[in-house]
Image: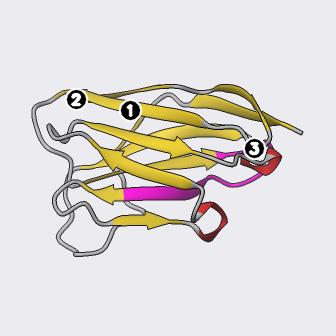
Amino acid sequence: QVQLVESGGGLVQAGGSLRLSCAASGRTFTSAAMGWSRQAPGKEREFVAGIRMSGGNTYYVDSVKGRFTISRDNAKTTVYLQMNSLKPEDTAVYYCASRWSWSGKDVPTSGYNYWGQGTQVTVSS
C-alpha cells in the first residue's frame, strides 16, 4: 500500500502564496505521475496540476496557469505545488494523487491510483 501525506495548507489573504508538499511512502515503487486535485464546497473535484516523474512534463488547468508550479524532488517521491497570486476561488481541499503506471508522453489527468487525505487551502478576500 502507498501512503500520500500532504502538508502546507492554511489560510492566506488574496494575492498571497502557499506551498503544498506531498510525500509518498510505503510500497517501494516510483510513481509514473503525481498531481494535485482540488474540491471546493458544492463543486466537483478538479484536477489542477500534474507532473510525469520521469521527464518532468507538467500539466496545469487553465485557471491556475502562470500562478501555480508543480515540481518533484530528485528521489521522485515528493511533489510540491507552489501557489502564488492566490484568489478566493482557489479555496478548496487539495488532494495529492499518485499514478503508478503510465506509458504516455503527456501528463495523465485521470486514472490515479492513490490519494492523500487532503489539505485545506482558504484564501480570504
> Callout 3: helix, strand or loop?
loop
Along the viewing direction, whichever of 56 and 1 lies nearer the viewer: 56
Q: Amino acid at mark 1?
A: Cys
Magenta span contains residue 7: no
User: What residue is disc 2 on?
Assistant: 1
Mark nearer the N terminus (3 vs 1): 3
Nearest to the eye among marks 1 and 2: give it. Answer: 1
Task: Classify 10 Å Cα crowding around label 1: few (below 14), some (14-19), many (20 and above).
Answer: many
Residue visible at 50% across and 28% down in the picture: 117
The quadrant of the rendering that contains the C terminus is: top right
Residue visible at 14% across and 37% down in the picture: 75
Return the x and y of residue 66 as percentages of the image width and height: 57, 63
Mark nearer the N terminus (1 vs 2): 2
**Residue 44, located in which quarter of the rendered image?**
bottom right
User: What residue is disc 1 on?
Assistant: 22
Magenta span contains residue 49: yes
